[in-house]
Amino acid sequence: MHVTAGVDFGGTNIKIGLVTRHGRVRQETVLPTQACRRPAAFVERVGVAVTSLLQRERRPCRLDGIGIGAPGLIDAAQGRIHRLVNVPGGWAGVALGQLMSRRLRCPCIVDNDANVVALGEWRFGAGRGAAHMVAVTLGTGVGGGLIIEGRLVRGATGSAGEVGHLPIRPDGPRCGCGSRGCVEAFVGAWALRRRAHALIRQHPGSVLAKLVARARGDFTPELLSRAARAGDRHARALWRDVGVELGQALAGLVNVLNPERLVIGGGVANAWPWFAPSLQRTVRERAFEVPARAVRIVRAQLDDRAGVLGAASLIWEQEVK
Ligand SMILES: [Zn+2]
């Protein structure tokens, strides 16, 4: 039996799975990122973990390759890390693809985690069957990935698909990337925290204020959804704004790329019922009529499996070249 290994390298955990061509995860395990945050430790521990997953299989199993989705700027063509976000440990310039390939004696492809999620959803999730797809991951940051003509688009230096840093308001709030008014500066979880706290100051008696106080001030987007569900009109208005802001950026992408599908995932996408209607409306109002009518805006389907499945798919994507 042939399998590929998919590695989802996150800030807290490293998820590893053996995946078949049909998208079945046969074996999986999780390592704490803390123990693998230096390149040499990562290569060694992931190498050991993949080998022991292979040994769990009763029948002989051939490893066709290993794909890694990592958080940061990656040169996928070279398998080299430019810079990782939220993982300290001297990764700049590390040729991870080459090191891992040598360790496991099989091909290794490394790519940005948002690209990998897009690939996973396209092959096995909400993007199946679409030749043109945009995936948006709403989390602490806002990531994205583009599939055009059935191929993942990486751009000249590997950073294509950074949907979160489309500017929607030139005088908007400062963004983590150094620019201003990016989508992420409005709808990233860190921006939602700032906006929720501003709401709480204005409306100290609101449901949201009570929920955040009960959580000892520890805001999560989930609290904002719970407040909306409980009828807090300020929380609902904030989610409506989020839909409009996201919709503005996505309307531009619909005009530029004419995708069949827009797939929205990530933790913040759990608030779908609260922001999707204004998002859909904004895209309809702002994009050209024909592409706006053609595009289906849907929720991601794979949740936290997208990383492992997409990373494993990097190997098959390579084959069709
Ligand atoms: Zn930005």
Image: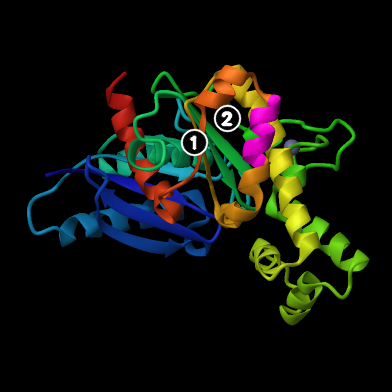
What's drawn in magenta, residue-wise?
279-286
The answer as to whether callout 2 falls within 8 Å of ligand 1 is no
Residue 211 located within the stretch drawn in magenta:
no
72 lies above or below 222: above
Q: Is residue 251 left or right of residue 13?
A: right
Q: Position of residue 70 (x, y in %)?
A: 50, 44
Amino acid found under the numbered disc labelled 2: Gly
Residue pointed to by mark 2: 161
For the C terminus, which image quadrant? top left
Q: Callout 1: few (<14), some (14-19), or many (20+) C-alpha neighbours within 10 Å?
A: many
Secondary structure at badge 1 equals: helix
CB atoms of marks 2 and 1 within 8 Å: yes
> Can residue 82 be seen by looking at this rendering?
no
- CA separation in Å, label 2 and label 1: 8 Å
Q: Position of residue 278 (x, y in %)?
A: 68, 43
Split into quadrants, the picture shows ligand 1 in the one at: top right
Secondary structure at badge 2 equals: loop
Residue pointed to by mark 1: 115
Amino acid found under the numbered disc labelled 1: Asn
Q: Callout 2: few (<14), some (14-19), or many (20+) C-alpha neighbours within 10 Å?
A: many
Q: Is residue 104 left or right of residue 278?
A: left
